[in-house]
Image: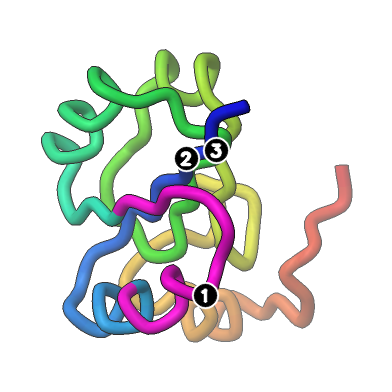
Amino acid sequence: MSELSYIVAAKGEWNAKYYEQYSKKQKGIWHFVKTPDELNNLLEIITPRYIFFPHWSWIVSDEIIEEYECICFHMTDLPFGRGGSPLQNLIIQGYETTIRSR
């Protein structure tokens, strides 16, 4: 059985630093991408078990979402609550929780 592959898609040097520090301690083959082009190019080569998006500013295409298991770290359902300072924006708008009733 081959080892599982994973992708961490994130921007910023701090994310690359943490990736380098922690990915070595995890099982599997880990890859880090910083741009949509890097992500798309890597997906032509590998089939990851999961794609993690801890800090990503670009829209992820429907094709990627439908083809792969994607994990997005965000305080609200997107696109609600997005922006440069999402928590501060929600507070200004009078929200007291990030959970929306459905």
Q: Residue at x 26, y 84 (%)?
A: 14
- SS for tag 2? strand
Name the residue nearer the viewer: 96 or 40: 40
Q: Which region shows up in magenta?
A: 20-31
Question: How packed is label 2: few (under 14 Cα within 10 Å), some, or many (20 or more)?
Answer: some
From what the image shows, is residue 67 above or below residue 70?
Answer: above
Q: Earlier in the sequence, mark 3 or mark 1?
A: 3
The answer to if 6 sits in the magenta stretch is no
Three-letter code, disc 1 = Lys
- Say which label, 2 or 1, has the lower sequence index: 2
Q: In which quarter of the image is the N terminus?
A: top right
Note whether 67 is above or below 79 in the view shown.
above
Rounded to the nearest angstrom, the CA distance separating label 2 from label 1 is 14 Å
Rendering coords of residue 31 (x, y %): 32, 51
Q: Position of residue 38 (x, y in %)?
A: 15, 40
Q: Which of 100/31 is in front? A: 31
Q: How crowded is mark 1: few (under 14 residues within 10 Å), some or many (20 or more)?
A: few
Q: Do the residues labelled 3 and 1 touch (CB within 8 Å)?
A: no
Residue under numbered circle 3? 4
In what element is the residue under mark 3?
A: loop
- Judge from the rendering whether residue 58 lies leftward or rightward of residue 93; answer left or right: left
Q: What element carries label 1?
A: loop
Q: Position of residue 62 (x, y in %)?
A: 44, 18
User: Which sits in the foreground, 25 or 64?
Assistant: 25
Q: Residue at x 23, y 65 (%)?
A: 11
Mark 3 in CB contact with mark 2 (< 8 angstroms)? yes
* Residue that mark 1 sits on: 25
